[in-house]
Image (cartoon, rainbow, N blue to C red):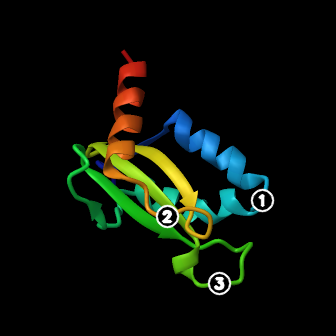
Amino acid sequence: MQNNHKAVQIEFTPEFKRNIRHLSKKYRHIKSDIQEVIKELETGHTRRDQIKNAGFTVYKVRAKNRDIKKEKRSGYRIIYYVQTTFKYILVTIYSKTEQGDITNNKISHIIAKFIESLK
């Protein structure tokens, strides 16, 4: 039987990559901690915690931080943009213990800059 599902493409903004590098200095398990979220996105299973009024179809998802002994609410926040049904852009990531919520303007700016860099 043939699989007719298209593979979901995941891309990363420079902001996301920069934040991973920075956070990995303090949290050595960050890449494996966020892998579950990335696998879910790749299979098309999105978590629907939409960020309203960001100018784009953007969602926020929580990921557990194994390097701290607190509950999931204290873990990472991953912001991703659904560009198409089969293409998601990981916009940014931050540790909730180190940073409060990111503004919609900042999210929009990161996405717009990323889109512009592709032209």
Q: Secondary structure at mark 3?
A: loop
Residue named by callout 2: 100
What amino acid type is highlighted by mark number 3?
Lys
Q: CA distance from mark 2 to mark 3?
A: 16 Å
Residue drawn at x 74%, y 72% is 67
Q: CA distance from mark 2 to mark 1?
A: 18 Å
Residue 7: image location, x then y, percent: 39, 45
| 22 sits left or right of 116 in the view | right
Residue 104: image location, x then y, percent: 32, 50
Tell me the crowding category of disc 1: few under 14, some 14 to 19, or many 20 or more residues within 10 angstroms, Cα based.
few
Q: Earlier in the sequence, mark 3 or mark 1?
A: 1
Tell me the crowding category of disc 3: few under 14, some 14 to 19, or many 20 or more residues within 10 angstroms, Cα based.
few
Q: Earlier in the sequence, mark 2 or mark 1?
A: 1
Residue drawn at x 37%, y 53% is 103
Residue named by callout 3: 70
Q: Secondary structure at mark 2?
A: loop
Along the viewing direction, whichever of 36 and 61 lies nearer the viewer: 61
Whether pointer 2 and pointer 3 mark residues with C-beta atoms closer than 8 Å, the reply is no
Mark 2 vs mark 3, foreground winner is 2
Residue named by callout 1: 26
Residue 94: image location, x then y, percent: 56, 57
Q: Quadrant of the C terminus?
A: top left
Residue drawn at x 32%, y 40% is 108
What amino acid type is highlighted by mark number 1?
Lys
